[in-house]
Amino acid sequence: MSDSFVLLWGATSLSEQESAELFSLLTSSERARAASLGQVLSQRYLSGRYLARKLGGDILGEDWTSVIPIARCGECGMDHGAIILEDTDVHISLSSSGEKLVAAGISGRRIGVDIERGYIDDTREVAGRAGTHTVTLGSWCEYEAIVKAMGVGNAVSIDELDPTVVTSQYTVHNATQHERHVLALAVSR
Ligand SMILES: [Zn+2]
């Protein structure tokens, strides 16, 4: 088990060549998920699966075409959400904002990554359990990364996260600026 995660940036759409390479590799559940989505979301989904394979190949030291990402959404049961690579303990998280996509992966731990287009000190209004809060984009990005690592998504709002619990169970890599995007990452201990 390694402490270090691997991160890969990509785009929310694929070139014709990349699409062609990916198409023959898709599993039946990936095809079903892609077919259930409209054009833009489908492109983004397939770009995520492409990037997850590339990242998985890097982590496992294998050819990317042999990597099979799988997921099962807790809500709809389809093949999306937090990813595990088949027959491994490699966990992969994806995030996109604007035209950028990012994949983060690690062996033996759960991981959550989030990117947001904008600047770290930008503010936004977000809904919490106890009303609306004004938070920086950096804080929001960290919150998203944590709930993705926890596997709870937005079912746990930003004012329900217990900082003591979070820091005892997760390593949070605080938000950093990457050109026009903010990125944060959380990894289970
Ligand atoms: Zn779902």
Image (cartoon, rainbow, N blue to C red):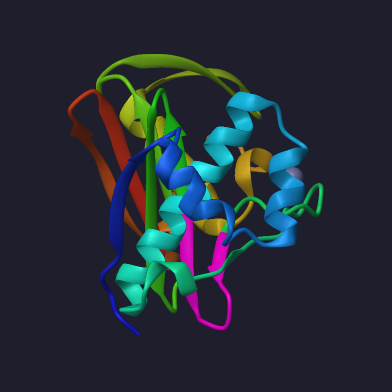
Q: Nearer the viewer, residue 60 or 96?
A: 60
Residue at 47%, 48% (x, y): give it.
94
Occupied quadrant, residue 109: bottom left
Q: Residue lying farthest right?
A: 76
Occupied quadrant, residue 117: top left
Q: Is residue 163 left or right of residue 4?
A: right
Give the position of the N terminus as an image quadrant: bottom left
The magenta stretch is 83-93
Assess whether residue 20 is covered by the magenta stretch: no
Residue at 45%, 41% (x, y): give it.
95
Give the position of the C terminus as an image quadrant: bottom left
Point out residue 50 in the picture as x, y percentages from the top left corner. Answer: 46, 52
- The relative height of residue 82 versus residue 99 in the rendered view (above or below) is below
- The relative height of residue 49 versus residue 123 in the rendered view (above or below) is below
Q: Ligand 1 quadrant?
A: top right
Q: Is residue 23 left or right of residue 73?
A: left
Q: Is residue 168 visible?
A: no
Residue at 50%, 80% (x, y): give it.
89
